[in-house]
Image (tube, grey):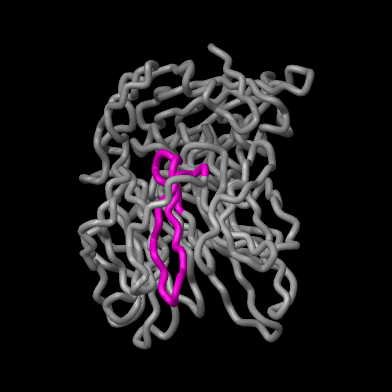
Amino acid sequence: MTRFKIQPLSRRGILGAGAATFIAPRAFAQSALGGDDTTAAPAPAASGGNNGPAISVSGAQSAPIPIAVAPFTDPTGNPSQYGGQITGVLSDDLGHSGLFRPIDPTSFVPNSVANGTPVWQNWSILGAQALITGDVADQGGGQLRVEFRLWNVAQQAQVQGTAYTTTVDNWRRIAHIIGDVVYQQMIGEKGYFDSRVAYISEAGSTTSPVKRLAVMDYDGANNQFLTDGSSMALSPEYNPARQQLAFVSYQSNNPRVYLFNLQTGSERLVGGFGDLSIGPKFSPDGNSLLMSVSRNGGAAIVRMSADGGGMTELTNYASINVSPSFSPDGSQIVFNSDRDGNQQLFVMNADGSGAKRISFGAGRYAEPAWSPRGDLICYTFWGSDVGGFSIGVMAPDGSGERILSQGFLVESASFCPNGRVIMFYRQTPTPDGHNSRLVTIGIDGFNERLVDTPSNASDPSWGPLLA
């Protein structure tokens, strides 16, 4: 079995090198869920070929796939400290997606893996469609070797087996990476677990708020504060191509757009134009930025190089044009504007031409974001007929509009890397002010979950899969 070393914040060496796999003749059988909800597909070859999903996403959404995650042991079969932690995070990842139903480990029959091979009947009686087993070996010098295997219980066959070598402090990333591999094998799409989220940490009082730029793993772990709160931070945006954030900082009480380098910790001013500059959004290649610049009572959307040069106005200042977001191919931009009287969503070409209104509901629309899949635009909506704020989605032409979640205040939706899950923040009033928490929800409107953060939180920006 080939071994792969993981460096902190990088998995290029693992995925780029090609993982060692042990392949079953076929992947998950059509009879596993029954009916038309599954499609038979051979397991991909070790070279990384793609033969389609093992399970249809629509079927998994209506009936999550029952999967057993056996506690990872040491190579002798005894309990492992890191093995237990890895399987805990792995189970949480799969359950978080809403497409899998991890089976309660207290129901496992003892000694159901013998000499590395499942005792099949012990997993079949639990209704497990798939099984994950593994072991963790301490190699000394702060190094771990983690091996996992994915099994098809119905066919009594192994689908994949992979070994990784990494530092001890990377055990959580190993769990996320394994989860992404399992997700891709069974769903046929890339996962999103090995990703991070930038957000604004909120503390202090309503009248004297302290808002700091922060990042964390997608599930809330490994939280880091990037600014000290001496200047208010707002609107973080992950660069999709490199370890970099754009955000708005109120240094000297003057809102300007800055770039933060996640590798060096340095920050620099990118844009300060007109009365204020807000809402930075990167192009898909990460080389340019959109932002809104206010002047003379109006606001225009501008595009400029990420190094701060070559500004081009894409709209005029005759109305308020804000919250731009690129389509994943970079050819179009969605934004919101009051040019027709109240805030609505518009789509224009990347050069500013051909603007077309796509929202027509009896209310106001704001903060659109284009899905990485290209099929949906999410947004914030509020109107008198809904009694509060809502997070919704629609197709890029405005069709298929539907509400995913509602509340006293829900805002700032951001898609995960594969476009299947949205993160936003939910604010609720309290006697002393408000609580503000990050939550996730599937694009089907189900499986809403709280993301644990050490303080009030807002303005999430979901970053790409770690490279």
Q: Please, what is the dominant secondary structure of the magenta stretch?
A: strand
In magenta stretch: residue 298:
yes
Q: In percent of the image, x 44 and y 77: which residue is there?
A: 297
Magenta run includes residue 6: no
Q: Position of residue 306 (x, y in %)?
A: 49, 44
State the image coordinates of residue 86 (x, y, percent, origin top left): 63, 36
From which residue to which does the magenta span run? 281-307
Question: How far from the left and from the top, in percent, is residue 141?
Answer: 79, 19
User: Image quadrant of residue 336?
Assistant: bottom left
User: Going by the picture, which residue comes out furthest to the right?
Assistant: 141
> Which residue is at the front of the view, 110 or 460?
460
Report the number of numbered marks. 0
Q: Residue at x 39, y 61 (%)?
A: 301
Where 343 sits versus 269, above or below? below
The percent position of residue 21, horizontal first and vertical second, equals: 45, 18
Residue 102 visible (yes or no): no
Identify the residue shown where x is 62% and y is 46%: 260
Residue 266 lies in quadrant: top right
Looking at the picture, tell me which residue is in the foreground, 220 or 334: 334
Seen at 45% across and 41% down, the residue is: 286
Q: Quadrant of residue 5?
A: top right
Does any portion of residue 162 appear in the rendered image?
A: yes
Left or right relative to 467: residue 421? left
Q: Is residue 347 left or right of residue 234?
A: left
366 or 160, which lies in front? 366
